[in-house]
Amino acid sequence: MSESMRFIVVRHAESEWNQRGILQGQLESPTSARGLRQIDALPGALAGYAFSAVISSPSRRALTTAQAISQAHSATLHLDPRLHEQHLGDFQGLTAAQILERNPAVGDALFAGDVAVVPPGGESVLEAANRLRQALLCWEAEGDTCVVTHGNTLAGLLWLLDGADFRVPFTRYSPHNCSYSTLIRHGQSLEIENWGLATHLLNGNLL
């Protein structure tokens, strides 16, 4: 295993359900028209990296983003279910208003950024973040690796790596669609180099 390596971690491009304010969790939703334009802006932003591989969540919205990066960099694409979004259980496919109406206590806690709250039938953000962390710690490759994952899962990992302070909501770290963060692995530890990089999305109403 390489002693030191860099991960460029991308949140997938906007999906149609993102656009409509529907919580997807591990359900499927296609990339929106704006999401496709966000993907078009990625090659320039990531041109300075030479990826040895791209690893992606198996969800369709992540794969659309990952395949474009893989092709632009001639890098092998790998799928890893540990990169999937937080499983939102009974909340999947609902809007925030519907969730708050059906289960106000758990909904309030989730939207307030509680990493430990578990939606009925689902998993916590902390659980999702830890499986993503484990995937990155186990990955064996030489050179930079691009990772395509999801909003809550990535926000939870950034929260975890930036001190894991339960007084701080994980939503503070919520990334824009098609933004990216850079993480460095030293042995069996991960640290944040940069997070929430999105200057490539400033033109064309892409944020």
Image (cartoon, rainbow, N blue to C red):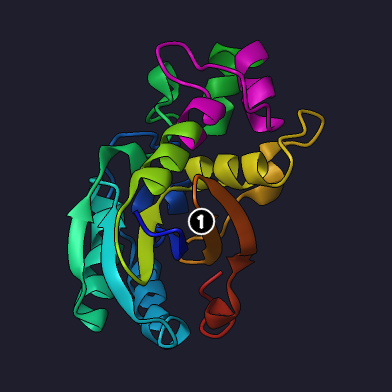
For the image shown, how many numbered marks are present on the structure? 1
Residue at image position (68%, 26%) is 114
Q: Nearer the viewer, residue 196 or 177?
A: 196
Q: Secondary structure at mark 1?
A: strand
Q: Residue at x 24, y 57 (%)?
A: 63
User: Residue at the location (37% across, 77% down)?
Assistant: 37
Q: Residue 190, relative to residue 108: is it above or below?
A: below
Tell me if residue 108 is in the magenta stretch.
yes
Residue 30 visible in this rendered orientation of the protein: no
Seen from the viewer's position, the closer of residues 15 and 160 is 160
Q: Is residue 180 visible to us here?
A: yes
Q: Quadrant of residue 23?
A: top left
Q: Position of residue 184 (x, y in %)?
A: 54, 61
Locate residue 35 relative to residue 204 in the image: left or right: left
Residue 29 x, y percent position in the rendering: 28, 46
**In this view, 18 is above or below 91:** below
Tell me which segment is drawn in magenta: 105-129
- Mark 1 surroundings: few (<14), some (14-19) or many (≥20) residues within 10 A: some
Pick the front one: 104 or 123: 123
Examine the image and state in which quarter residue 55 appears. bottom left
Residue 118, percent across and down?
A: 53, 16
Q: Amino acid at mark 1?
A: Arg
**Residue 63 placement, left or right of 162:** left
Where residue 188 sits: x, y (%)? 50, 45
Q: Quadrant location of the C terminus?
A: bottom right
Residue at the disc numbered 1 = 185
Tell me if residue 203 is in the magenta stretch.
no
User: Could you tell whether 127 is left or right of 167 in the image?
Assistant: left
